[in-house]
Image: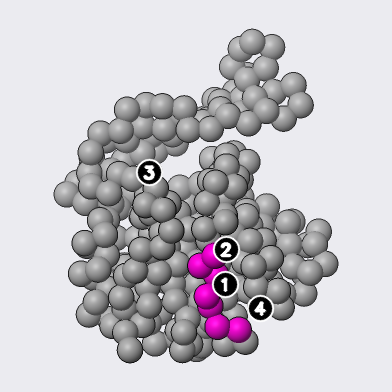
Amino acid sequence: MSEHNDPYARSGQYIDIMIAGWWEHHGETLVEALGELPSDAGPVVDAGAGGGHGTRLVAAALPGARILAVEPSLPLRTVLLSRIAEDADLRDRVTVDGDDLLSAHLPDRIGGMVMANLIGHFSPHERDRLWEDLAPRLAPGAFILLNLAAPLKPERVERARMSEVRLGDRSYVGWAAAEPSGPERVNWHMTYEVRGDGRVLASDDVRYDWWTITEEALRAETSPHRLRAVPHGPSEAGLYKLLPEG
């Protein structure tokens, strides 16, 4: 997920408004999990922070906690920095790292991590590197909170409207479809439209690969790093806590 291969380079202008519904729908479940993190055990990392929906949620759920927001995409990080700068509380508590998670400047001890809508950007080899790096950094009682997004195995996803947001006189519509692109991958085809006056005023097409992973695979690859995957909340959320064994 380097700046040279940013899947959100063109779609970043739409992502923040279109992902808001996901956070509204699952936010309460995430807050419930975050409430189980230890207090004053180190900064909480919001990995793949995007425009900051999750960063604000972490800040509200954990008053006083220091937060490290990691976001390598330039357009998304621009929104993130603006959102933090306009809020006095966030300005005091949130630090932004512009590297990807494999290269980010993480502290030796962290009080927890949120990886929302992120894990599919990493190959199995990269995930193994992540678990090896992250497991020793988790403070006692801390965990990684992540979600597994459909499809969990390579399969065709029929084109469907994923989001529509109206701002002023214009509507922003997102369409999504996917095709298998390997034994553990799908290739997403996203179309973002700006509509007004009964017609499409602008359209952007984006394709990117997404690594699929099942619950069984998550358990198998995290276990060697002494991490235990525990489901959290309703199954539709696909949320898991990665807890250090023992």
Label 3 crowd (10 A; few <14 / some 14-19 / many >=20) = some
Q: How far apart are marks 2 and 3 (CA)?
A: 30 Å
Residue 58 in the figure: left or right of residue 216: right
Which element carries disc 1, helix, strand or loop?
Answer: loop
Q: Which colour scheme is used?
A: one colour
- Given this view, does label 3 or label 1 mark the residue nearer the observer? 1
Q: Mark 1 points at which residue?
A: 35
Q: How far apart are marks 1 and 2 (CA)?
A: 6 Å
Q: Distance between the residues labelled 2 and 4?
A: 16 Å
Q: Are marks 1 and 2 in contact (CB under 8 Å)?
A: yes
Residue 31 % position (x, y): 57, 63
Quadrant of residue 124 in the image? bottom left
Q: Distance between the residues labelled 4 and 1?
A: 15 Å
Q: Name the residue under label 3.
A: 208
Q: What stretch is highlighted in magenta?
A: 31-39
Indicate which disc residue 66 carries: 4
Could you say which is closer to the camera, residue 71 or residue 168? 168
Q: Which residue is located at x 41 percent, y 63 percent?
A: 232
Quadrant of residue 95 in the image? bottom right
- Given this view, does label 3 or label 4 mark the residue nearer the observer? 4
Residue 114 % position (x, y): 50, 66
Residue 2 % position (x, y): 46, 60
Q: Which residue is located at x 41 percent, y 32 percent?
A: 176
> Looking at the picture, which amino acid does disc 2 mark?
Val
Indicate which disc residue 31 carries: 2
Label 2 crowd (10 A; few <14 / some 14-19 / many >=20) = some
Residue 30 % position (x, y): 53, 61
Residue 60 in the figure: left or right of residue 124: right
Q: Which residue is located at x 45 percent, y 47 percent?
A: 7
